[in-house]
Image: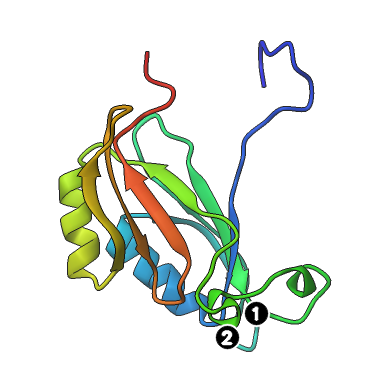
Amino acid sequence: MAGSSRPGIGSVVPCLRYRDAPAAIDWLCDAFGFERHAVYPNGDGTIAHAEISTGRTGGRGMVMLGSAVESDYGALMRQPDELGGANTQGIYVVVEDIDAHYARARAAGARIAIDIRDQDYGGRDYTCRDPEGHVWTFGNYDLWAE
């Protein structure tokens, strides 16, 4: 990072695996407003690697994803339905109009886990699950705002 006095610190990019990655990409873009940055399909219809971005003006948010396949990396991962719906991590995405985003996600069928609410620390957010059970929180609390 330019100007940083701490070497080795850079961008953080969550990585997810989906059983039906092509459908997940479509859904994440439709429901949450992500944009396809890059999608690399395999010959069998699975996704080797994909990058979806927030598309937010001035934002650099991105999520990498691919198909859940047997591999060295895949052996480290479990899908939420293999853990009784539990997740071992969650993703927080900053959005500008949280109420409109919430309405869009609900209309697309996002399973709301924690309804939209104002937080004591400032900001407003909600938490939901995508069709394969991954947990997402969307809010307007911008940690980088001054």
- Residues tagged 2 and 1 counted as in contact (Cβ below 8 A): yes
Residue 100, percent from left and from top: 16, 49
Three-letter code, disc 1: Asn
Quickly name the residue at label 2: 45
Q: Circle 1 sits in a helix, a strand or a loop, which is it?
A: loop
Q: Categorize mark 1 by other alpha carbons within 10 Å: few (<14), some (14-19), many (20+).
A: few
Total marks shown come to: 2
Image color mode: rainbow
Residue type marked 2: Gly
Q: In front: 41, or 73?
A: 73
Q: Is residue 45 above or below residue 141?
A: below
Quarter of the picture holding the C terminus? top left
Classify mark 2: residues with Cα within 10 Å, few (<14), some (14-19) or many (20+). few
Which residue is the site of mark 1?
42
Tell me the CA gap for discs 2 and 1: 6 Å
Q: Residue at x 54, y 79 (%)?
A: 84
Quadrant position of residue 105: bottom left
